[in-house]
Image (cartoon, helix red, strand yellow):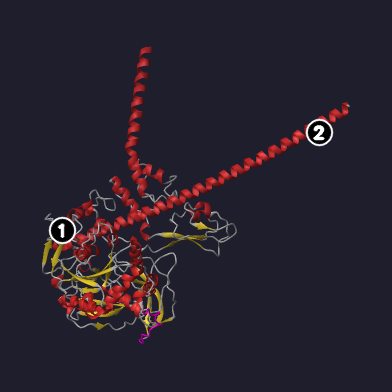
Amino acid sequence: MLSAVLTITAIAGICGVGLGAAGRRLASQQSPVVDRIDELLPQTQCGQCGYPGCRAYAEAVASGEAPVNLCTPGGNATVNAIAELLQVDPEPIEEADSGPKVAFIDEDQCIGCTRCLPACPVDAIVGAQKQMHTVIADECTGCELCLDACPMDCITMVAVEPPLSSRVRPLPTPEASRAHPEQRPGPLRHREVTPRRGGVAVDDAKHLSRDAPVATAPLPEALAVPLLDHTGARLAASVAAGDTVYRGTPITGMPADKPGVPLHAPTSGTVWGVERRPIAHPAGATATCLILEPDGADTPAAPLPIFEEPLQADPEALLERIRDAGVRGMGGAGFPTTLKLADARRSGVDTLVINAVECDTYLTCDETLLRQRAAAIVHGARIAARACGADRILAAVKRSAAEAATALEAAVEASDASIQVVRVDANYPAGNERHVVYPTTGRTVPSGARPTAVGVVCQNVATLDAIYHGVCAGEPSVGRLVTVTGGGIAARGNYWVRVGTPVAALIGDAGVPGHRTLVGGGIMGTPITDRRIPITHGMNGVVLEGPEEAPLEEQPCISCSRCAEVCPEGLEPFEMARRIRAGVGVGEAPEHVELDPMRCTGCSSCELVCPSSKPLAAITGHARDMARARMRERAQAEHARQRQEAKQAREERRRREKAEARQRKRAAVTGEAGQQREAGQQREAGQGETTEG
């Protein structure tokens, strides 16, 4: 009997040891999954999921105790990421796609009870006892914990417009392209395309608009100026509905905490107000626009003070003038020129490159501007070089633009400027900043770096023309030269267009039904379906697709690897497209550098040579947007975590200080009581001695 008991006890002990070891092993294997889930969560520590913090919820999800759709602040993007990690079907959060929301306090009803302050996990509410409270919208995570804490029900959740940088273009599919061919992303079908190592030799179709006379587009009935800065954030209008403005009147201010440049009224007239209008964006976004009704007089505002000797002026004064004139990059990016030149000055550049390559097909606005205003462009380049500290100026011009190169050389000779004109090959994408530096200067810009890394800054010819007029004529930048071309329109040419002019006012009803209208060039242009979209500083062309220019229907990939051969960044677009459409690693760090969508410049060289007509650049662009959105979410989560930890540390410090104060008070009271007892004892002892005596 005793031996049986001992045997059972030994077996139980052995099983216990084995189960303990297995538990420790399984826990160690599970912890990486918990860490990954915890990284995906927004770290608001709000408790809406029913668990005490994001880490606890991550452990519950990893063990299967909780579903993946309980994190309301993270939204469906976080749900999909966790579901992809765990290889389970995502379960959407109800009403999660309604957009981000932040708390708003009705100050007329707030009694200043301060109950909402400790409820906020990230200290986004400020206020004091019996004073009105307010919410810092940029810090609010939308956790809604303050709603239940408020006894007056004066806190509501208000929807806010997400920034353009967080928008993700849709993943193109063959079904979507067949259903809506006018929305299909990608370049036009070009007649002659020859693959080259790191590029493409393509028929540029510039003859369609090159020889047409330059005209001025009439002012429309209403102008819509997007109130956006270069980051996609909204700008506050400095004018109100009913105000009268003149051409060049600033309509936005310049916040001290956000670098940028102001916007100016494109013409004289009356401000109608602000409203949301569609803008050119791969994700089909809208933006708040200032609506201006022209009066037809086009009366200019008082010009900015003119620089008589700009080449001897202080560089800081030139940078300030370029900013006040609202000069933005007109090659397509729209980045504030003053910020670019100031960064170049801080980086110590020695060379300024006039980028006159204009590599995108169908566009001739830069070439036309160079033929007509070469002297102004040369002078603008010298001013820009003075502002950024460059000692040398080089001009890159395509070999095929012989007339433009001749005009530039004549202007250089007439100005007695030390500018060297370099004729570069016409292979696409030779006009990209990183790719124009090497044939012009012999310097190689590393992948992921800007030309300033090798001492070079590039400026588009239209930008230099705007610099000249802003510095030497005191004229703010309110318009640009736009190429209107393509097989779908007969009135091709280059037009001077005011910023804010709707595309419909420029092209009317032109176009072929069922075919695309693109803003930009024939390769990198963005398809639009709403012609109310306004012209902006970075919009250099409007291309209307003809039947012979429409891309062919998408076919299965044949793995010919032509896309990898022509990719100037050394990527493998065909393999990237397979992975992205399969949902493998979208938004995450790539396994190999050849599969990194963040290295893609979106030049669409791969699409030009693809025999299967796959929208490779758009597929990669979707992954790139997803990666940026994920990085933004992680940055916000890290910021929220830091604020939450700072709040916890502050509360702990206050508790510690209160505890120390209580201890000091208790010690003081105890010490005082002890002194009183000691004094009493001494008095009693003295009285006793007196009695004895």
In the rendered view, tell whether residue 237 sits above or below residue 169. below
Magenta span: helix, strand or loop, mainly? Answer: loop
In the rendered view, tell whether residue 174 sits above or below residue 317. above
Image quadrant where residue 109 sits = bottom right
Residue 320 location (% of width, % of height): 39, 72
Of callouts 2 and 1, the N-terminal one: 1
Does 298 appear in magenta?
yes
Element at badge 2?
Answer: helix
For the residues labelled 2 and 1, the Cα–Cα distance comes to 103 Å
Residue 174 location (% of width, % of height): 18, 61
Can residue 336 be seen? no
**For this rendering, which residue is in front, 484 or 195?**
195
Q: Which mark is residue 563?
A: 1
Image quadrant where residue 506 sits = bottom left
Does 464 appear in magenta?
no
The amino acid type, in three-letter code, at marker 1 is: Cys
The amino acid type, in three-letter code, at marker 2 is: Arg
Q: Residues within 10 Å of mark 1 (few under 14, many from 20)?
A: many
Q: Name the residue tied to disc 2.
A: 683
- Left or right of 336, for residue 691: right
Image quadrant where residue 281 sits = bottom left
Which part of the image, by quadrant, shows the C terminus?
top right
Q: Closer to the observer: label 2 or label 1?
A: 2
Residues in magenta, as a range: 296-308
